[in-house]
Amino acid sequence: MWKDEILEEIHSYREDYARSFNYDLKAIFDDLKKKQIAHEQRVVTLPIKRKTAKNG
């Protein structure tokens, strides 16, 4: 079976990151929120896309 080295690296990083918080989703969320606030200039806010009769 074909393996994507980049995806494997991403999955490994994600697993290590989750393990570092003992898989506690609230702790992970709080950490990500802190990082977002610390780097506010990098956060992109996109407008909400609403479906209309024209675009399906």
Image: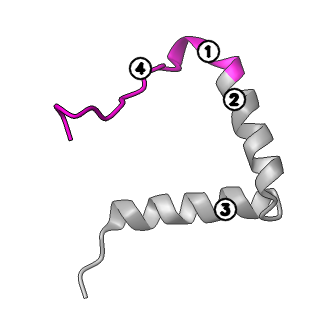
Mark 1, Cα crowd under 10 Å, few <14 / some 14-19 / many 20+, is few
Residue denoted by label 3: 16
- First of labels 1, 4 by sequence position: 1
Residue type, mark 3 in image: Asp
Left/right placement of residue 9 relative to residue 28 reads: left
Q: Classify residue 51 by image quadrant.
A: top left
> Which residues are drawn in magenta?
37-56
Q: Secondary structure at mark 3?
A: helix
Residue denoted by label 2: 35
Residue type, mark 1 in image: Glu
Residue denoted by label 4: 47
Q: Nearer the viewer, mark 1 or mark 4?
A: 4
Residue denoted by label 1: 40
- First of labels 2, 3 by sequence position: 3
Cα separation between marks 2 and 4:
22 Å
At 25% across and 88% down in the image, what residue appears?
1
Pick the quarter of the image with the C terminus. top left
| Furthest-front residue in this view | 53
Q: As displayed, is residue 45 above or below residue 10?
A: above
- First of labels 3, 1 by sequence position: 3
Q: Secondary structure at mark 1?
A: helix
Left/right placement of residue 26 relative to residue 6 reads: right
Viewer-closest of 27 and 56 = 56
Cα separation between marks 2 and 1:
8 Å
Residue type, mark 2 in image: Lys
Is mark 1 in CB contact (under 8 Å) with mark 4? no
- Residue 26, image x, y percentages: 81, 50
Viewer-closest of 50 and 53 = 53
Cα separation between marks 2 and 3:
17 Å
